[in-house]
Image: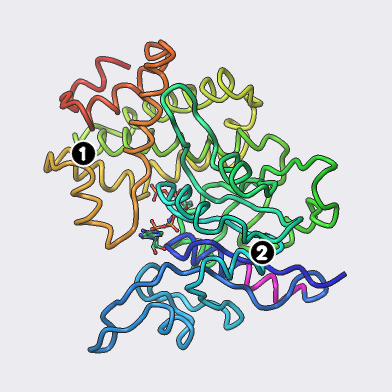
Amino acid sequence: GKPIRIGVMGSGNWGTAIAKICGENAREHPEIFDTQVHMWMYEETVPYQGEQRKLTEIFNSTHENVKYLRGVRCPSNVYANPDVRDVSSRSDILVWVVPHQFVERICHQINGSVKSGSVAISCIKGVSVQEESVSLFSDVIQKHTGMYCGVLSGANIANEVAREKFCETTIGYDPDDTVNPRFTPEVISALFYRPYFRVQMVKDVAGVALGGALKNIVAVGAGIVDGLGLGDNTKSAVMRIGLMEMQNFGHVFFNCDRLTMVEQSCGVADLITSCLGGRNHHCAVAFVQTRKPMHVLEKELLNGQKLQGAATAKEVHAFLRHHNRVHEFPLFTAIYRIVYEGMPPEDLINVI
Ligand code: NAD
Ligand code: 13P
């Protein structure tokens, strides 16, 4: 059949790194993929070499995302496209990598434009919560666009992956017979596998999605520990308790395989990397030291990149409260109270 066309929705720190990977693989497997990869870029104007320029124009002439992934060159077959409907309508596989707060709006923007029979992969770390229910973004995307949606998540700090430092990732992909059979697990794996980016395919899609979402809450807790100047033992305790709460949450509400969290990159490994060096950890350290609200620190410290952990803590807390299960998740609850309700960070250790 015709080569499979790849679209990447999003061009932030991770979005650009993922587009780089897809571009490399599209080039390496022309028998499977169309070599040109379209990356949807939310257009903005940025200062560049003394003038104001469009980010898409800079990217398409230099192959560098100078705002969100500075210093990394993408392959020249990755094209930054500012038209979101054009990207969705031309793609057979649509890879979603946007901060989670924008997903629903983008689904409305592309309404009716999605190619029939296409599939999606979500690399988004977060959950969508309407108090009484919590949904995975793979399900949100599937519900709004009709595309079957798998999930990619792992211990993957974007700046390191983009510099080709070895890591692993997990892809949850379990399509039923209604999904176009050309999108086999082997094809999905070929789109993402690189020698420096090892892919493990699993069927527990919900477990993969929840690992990436919930570890962001724990990373805020690890940042609080470091902000307080407590030691590595304390941080490890927070990580262990966090891992148990991640596992229980997945098991209780989504019937996930308990082993996904403790055996896969999307669980324990992502938890570790995020608690050592991610953005959520970084901003939580600053939160304890300055006591400024997280959304202020996000603006001050991240140059347009987005935080997911604080928002996820709030969303998960609203859901747990609605279901009267708060007491079963003391760490998630304490992190929420510290960030949003003025609970002293020093009290973290007393309540977990
Ligand atoms: P980011 O944090 O760099 O956010 C910036 C992006 O948001 C830019 O592409 C910007 O154009 C876009 N944006 C800003 N305002 C917008 C608007 N109004 N509408 C639409 N888009 C807008 O993004 P990221 O790092 O690519 O993160 C995307 C997802 O990937 C998140 O769920 C994140 O948790 C996950 N993730 C990130 C990393 C990482 O290390 N950065 C690693 C793994 C997973
Ligand atoms: P942060 O958003 O906390 O930087 O985490 C990045 C990540 O998901 C690493 O796998």
* Residue range highlighted in magenta: 22-29
Label 1 crowding class (10 Å Cα cut-off): few <14, some 14-19, many 20+?
A: many
Q: Is residue 27 magenta?
A: yes
Residue at image x 51%, y 56%? 97
Residue 114 percent location from the top left of the image:
65, 59
Circle 1: element type: helix
Label 2 crowding class (10 Å Cα cut-off): few <14, some 14-19, many 20+?
A: few
| Helix, strand or loop for the magenta stretch, by majority | helix
Spatial CA distance of label 1 from label 2 is: 36 Å
Position of the C terminus, as image quadrant, is top left
Residue at image x 55%, y 78%? 79
Would residue 342 be found to the left or right of residue 194 on screen? left
Q: Which is more N-terminal, label 2 or label 1? A: 2
Residue 243 percent location from the top left of the image:
48, 28
Question: Disc 1 residue type?
Answer: Gly
Question: Disc 2 residue type?
Answer: Pro
Residue 295 percent location from the top left of the image:
23, 46
88 over 52 or under it: above or below: above
Circle 2: element type: loop
**Residue projecting furthest to the right:** 1
Quadrant for residue 336, please give it: top left
Nearest to the observer: residue 243 or residue 114: 114
Nearest to the observer: residue 338 or residue 95: 95
Position of the N terminus, as image quadrant, is bottom right
Q: Which residue is mark 1?
A: 227
Residue at image x 55%, y 59%? 110
Residue at image x 42%, y 23%? 319
Instruction: Tally the marks.
Output: 2
Would residue 251 be found to the left or right of residue 229 on screen? right
Nearest to the observer: residue 115 or residue 256: 115
Q: Which residue is mark 2?
A: 195
